[in-house]
Structures are given as C-alpha cells and as structure tokens.
Image (cartoon, coloured by chain):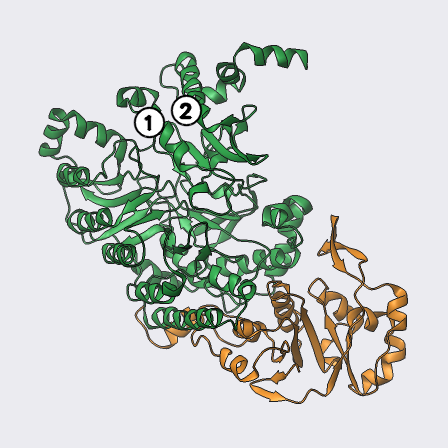
Amino acid sequence: MYRYDEYDHTLVLERVAQYRDQLQRNLAGELSDDEFRPLRLQNGLYIQRHAPMLRVAIPYGMLSSTQLRKLSDIGRRYDRGYGHFSTRQNMQFNWPRLEDTGDILAELATVEMHAIQTSGNCIRNITTDPFAGVAPDEIVDPRPYCEMLRQWSTFHPEFAFLPRKFKIAVSGTLEDRAVTYAHDVGLQLYRDEKGEVLARVIVGGGMGRTPILGSVIHDALPWQHLPTYLDAVLRVYNRYGRRDNAYKARIKILVKAIGAETFARQVDDEWQLERDGIATVTQAELDRASAAFTDPDAPLRPASDEGFDAKLASDPAFARWVSRCVRGHKRPGYRAVTLSLKPTGVAPGDISCKQMDALADLADRYSFCELRVSHEQNVVLADVALADLYELWLGARAHGLATPNIGLLTDIICCPGGDFCSLANAKSIPIAQAIQEAFENLDYLYDVGDLELNISGCMNSCGHHHVGHIGILGVDKTGSEWYQVSIGGSQGNLTSLGDVIGPSFAAEEVPAVITKLVETYVEQRTPEERFIDTVRRLGMAPFKAGVYGESTKKTEVIHG
Amino acid sequence: MAELIRGTEVVVDDWTWVRLPETNEPVRKSAGKVVLFKLTGEPAASEDVIAACDFPAGKVLLPLSVWLRRRDELATRADKGEIGVWLDSHEEPAVLAESLGGNLNRLPLIGVNFPKFIDGRGYSIAFILRTRYGYRNELRALGDVLRDQMFFFHRCGFDAYLLRADQKADRCIGALKDFTTPYQTSTDGQPPIFRRRSAAGDRP
C-alpha cells in the first residue's frame, strides 16, 4: 500500500501543529466556537450527542495491520474500547475528550494516518472498491488514481469552503462496487482499445433529502487530466452551488437546476484554463503511485487445494461461511475474504479493540499485513491463500468475526443513528438489531438469499437507505420516531433508488414489516430470482398488499 | 483597527474601502450565463444608492456596481491610478473584465470580499483573476479575513489582506507558512508535488 514520503509526513505533522494551536485558542476563548467549528470539522471532529466524535480517515479504505493496531490503541486509551467503521470506509470514535483530540491526531500521524477532511464542506475521503487490485473483473486498479486524487484534494486551497460536502468515488471494474452514480463525482475507469486508461465522469448523484443518480458529463477523460478536470468541476460548483440553504447546496441541485449538458459545457470552459498545464499528471507520477500498489510478494499456488476441499465437504459451518464470505481472486490459489462486522446484537460496523488486535494478527498471518474497509462496513482480507482459509476461519470465528451473513438480510448497512448522532431524527441501531433478531434462523436467511437492507436515521442518508433493496429511513413526526420503508433500490451497475411503500411505521412494527416483505418475495419469486429481481419484475403492488393488507388496496381504488 | 498586510509586511493602508449601505433587495443568482430560477438573496444595491454613493479624494476601492454605472465620471481618476474595484463573493470577474476591455491590469488594486469566512467563492474568484485574466497587480482579501485561512488566501493568488479588526497581524503573517509543501499547484507558483518529487530525484 501507499507509504508516506517526507512530503506526506511533513504535511500531516504541520496539520497536527496547526490543529493543536486552533484547539488551544478555542479552549482559551480566543477562537469562538463558531469559527472553530469548520476548522475542527475538517479535522474530523464533531460535537455529538454525548461527546465529541472523531472520524479518522482511511484513504480509499486501505489499512495496514500496524495502523489497525494503532486504532485499537487509541480506542483503548482515549475511547471506550471500541470503534465504528462508517459507510465512507472511515473509522469513528464516539467518546474522545475534546482536550485529547490534538494528542490523538499526533498518535495517528505516527502510523501515517490523520482525520483530515473527514467532515466539513470540503472534498472528503475518496472511496473505492474494497476488492481493488484483486477482483477478477477488474479492468483498472483504481488505487493509484485514488492516491493521486487524495493528494490533489488534501488542503486544496480553492475548495476548503465549498457550499457543502463533496464526495468522490472511483471504480475500475465491470461491476461497479463503489456506488459511483450516487456520489457528487463518480469516476469509472476503463481502457480504450489501445489500453489507455480513461475515466467516465459522473456528476451530481447523491442520496440525502433529494436522491438523484448522477449524469455522465465526460465519457472518455484521459487519466492525466483528472486533477485539472476535477478542478474545473469543483470551481463551477464552488462559485454557483447554492449557499442559502444547506439542503439545496450539494452539487446535484446545481446540476439539476442548470441541466447536465449546460453544467458540462461550463466545466469544459473552465477546464481550458488549466488543461495540459502543470497539474497534468505525468507518467512518472502514475508509475510512482502504482508502485505502491503492486501485488504482494505472494508465492504461486495451485488453483485448488485438497485440504480446503476436504474441509469444505466435512464441515458444513465452514462451507456456509465460504459460500457467503469468500470471493474469487485474480490470482489462482488465492481468495478475498470478507469478515462480517454484523453479528446479531452488535451495532453494524462496530468493532472492539480486542477484535481489532485479532484482525491485525489475522492480516499479518494470512493476508500480507493489509486490510480493507468496505462501504458495507465490513473488513476485507484481500490476499488469502486457499490453503489458509480454514485456519483463518477458525481464528476469525474465535473473535466473532466469522458471521456467515455477507450479502444477506442481516448484513445491514446502518448509520450510528439517534443513539450517537446529533443530526439523527430517529435511532437506527436498535432497528437493525431487532431485524437481525427476527431473522436469526440461518437456514431461512440463506433461503431468502441476497438481500441488502440499509438503514439511515435521518435524511442525510449515511446508511445509504436509498440504494438498499429494502431501505429504512428514520423520520421525525411531531417529536416521535417513525420509520419509512422503501424497496427497489440497488447499488452496482443497475443502480436505482428505492420507492417508499407507504405510510411509515413505529419502531416495534418494523421487524414484522420486513418479515412480510420477505414473505411476499418468497411466495412470488421464480427459481434463482433474488429479492431485488422480484421487486423489479412485479413492482410495488404485491409487496404493498403484503404489508398493509387488503384495506390499502381498497383505499387505493377509492382514491383512484 | 483593521490592519493591512501586503506580502508579508504590515503596511499603512492608503486606500479607502467604499461600501454601499446594505439593502434587502435580492438579485437573481446566475450560474455563468444561465440565470437560475430560484432567488438566493444576494445583496444588491439600487440605482439610487449607487448614484448617491459618495467617496473621498485619493485612492478609493469601489464596489463593482459603482464602477460599472459611473465609469465615465471616474475616468480621469482611474487614469491617475486612484481607482480600485472590489467584487463581492457572488459577483462575476467577467463583468469587471468586460468593463476594462479585458485588461484588468489597468487597475492597480482589485479586492475580493469574504462576507463570511465559510463563503469560499472568493478563492475561485482570485484564481480566475490571476489565471483567466492574467491580473498581476495587488489582489486584496476583504471582509472576514482571518488567520486560519491565510494560507489558502495566499495560494489562490491574494497578496494583500485587510484583516478583520480583531485579528493579530503578526499571527496572520505567521499563518501564511502553516504548511511548507502543499500537494497541488495553484497560482502561487508552486508546481504540484509530483513535479517537485521528481525534481528532487525521489524514487520513481
């Protein structure tokens, strides 16, 4: 993975010094809370319901075992012994003390980490496919490009005070695993017939209050031009994005207001200022960045392993785990493994410091000391030998990291919600837990099969509810918590936004509603059909009837 | 008393910054040449206010609207180098450039106002003035000009800073050097990091 050189080290240390000074001035009353707020946010620090929350950047989700051990160390010393992986592939600590935050950032800097631009109205952490570099369907390894863009976006002097936050996702695969159509900017990397890397630039997607899929504004941008072209995108947005209303300030609103074509023309016009200029990336820089993401020095292995086959045949629990949590790999004899952070009874994405240490050990032993965080809030070990899978499984299971539910209904994406977040309208973690409890029967869960269920505690959509096959959104109705349910959303190449099924529900009704949706699917499905396919084929009506009963149908007739 | 930093020195300000009284009259927000339907309440001055605007002899830094409407009567003073123009964060550099036949360097001073420090439009305005229009004279940050943004101001092309009254000038000058090796290029002449890396002979 990418290692800091002296420039990176210097910048991060200077940032720690700058932040310490700002924090000191704030504590001394020289810097008002209002003026400190955007500064601390750009260092990942929120003031939350119970305490500050510190969001640590994990650039494009890649983490070394050394870094994970440091996160564990910080969790023990400054928090309550655990951390939370967010849907932006970052880690959040929910209980640090404001006074300690400068020290925590200094600790992070010792392992080439920071919390820069993890919040605030600036360019946020860039996300990508957690299987980057190992996926069999990969066309372009997105990580060198992500790293170049990380450097381009860090402390960008022109775009530190945008109308609103700005999120970029990059993918380089046949199947989009980075939700590129639901980001402020999505970049899909591919190759032309000569093998040159091009980017399809998608702008103006997003979830939140106004979910919109992005529009393609450039279909074939050569990679060298990514920074200058993105400068142009950001400049148009910085100048013309709305600043009078935070809910209408994302780039998607601007793109919608003036139209994608007009927006693209303005970007192109702006781009001419810098095009082919000094910021155009050189081959030498791409080579330098790419050198950081070569394949690990892994021995060649046979494509099959007798020991593995034997365990698969003799141990059904292992076989079940393999069927859900192990994916193909571009090199023979290796697999990519997803370790679930979604066992029943734990907030999705939460991980104890003890588990972090265990994970770091597993990464050292079985996956070349590296890990990735997925936007589904799980952890990926990307380079595991087929012959090591059984031992890895035993080791992971011993620490509660082998729940065989990846891609199943209980692998819920969920924001921290009203238990922690001061923005939330409603709690989300207890809803996730109640649903997990309702679907504890593994056989049934496996029979139901692939089903993505996403929960957000408010319209900010940190839990990506719009693109869940089933989405749940916490809403506030006259001071009490209600939940709106939608179906038909999806990520991937057929990205779509879900539709709300009808009036919202009280918290205790939600598990039964999900059960009815699933029962309707099981009744109506054809063989091999996934939940989302059935919803696409049949539409809303049978699911609505399943949940609200015949009376809803009658009402619909009456109202025409 | 608001202090002025020019380059890295505190200097006496020989310009008078002229502002119009605030009105509540909104203007339509435009995105380039496209006028957005929604009004977003940017401040704008009425013709009466512009006509009544009074300013002293000597060097004056005028609002764009006053410059545009009263150019003829200001011509002589402009030739003497006594007129500077400032843009508010929603105003268009293109409009100013057009009024000067495309040659912004006829002005000795352009100001850009930051009504609030979180309004980052001024950074892009500065970048555009320096690059698209090749403006080379003094570019002054006005308004909510605070220590913690000095580094960004400088990188985007500002070379003068009229500090908010409560700011300490020595601290603000120090903050120009918060970071020594920025990653990306801007108008301050720093090449992007990858060109500096290869020049320094770092690993390929």
| Among the two numbered marks 1 and 2 on one chain, the one whose residue lies closer to the N terminus | 1
- Relative placement, left or right, of A196 versus B39 is left
- Amino acid under label 2? Pro
Q: Are marks 1 and 2 in contact (CB under 8 Å)?
A: yes
Residue situated in front as seen by the camera: A49 or B181: A49
- Name the image quarter holding the N terminus of chain B: bottom right
Q: Nearer the viewer, residue A356 or B74?
A: A356
Which tint is chain B?
A: orange
Query: Disc 2 marks which residue?
Result: A511
The structure residue drawn at horizontal position 23% and vertical position 43%, both measured from the top left corner, is A331
Is residue B92 found left or right of B175 in the rendered image? Answer: right
Q: Which mark is residue A484?
A: none
A503 over A156 or under it: above or below = above
Residue A44 location, quadrant: bottom left
Q: Using the image, name the chain to which the residue with label 1 belongs.
A: A
Chain identifier, green in the render? A
The location of residue A13, given as percent across then percent down, is 36, 71
On the rendered image, what quadrant is the C terminus of chain B found in?
Answer: bottom left
Q: Secondary structure at mark 2?
A: helix
Q: How many marks?
A: 2
The CA distance from mark 1 to mark 2 is: 9 Å
Q: Residues within 10 Å of mark 2 (few under 14, many from 20)?
A: some
Instruction: Residue A308 in the image: state x and y as whole percent.
Output: 12, 33
User: In the picture shown, does residue A27 fall above or below A195?
Assistant: below
- The residue beneath circle 1 is A437
- Viewer can see residue A191: no
Please state which amino acid type lies under the numbered disc 1.
Glu
* Residue A253 x %, y %: 63, 46
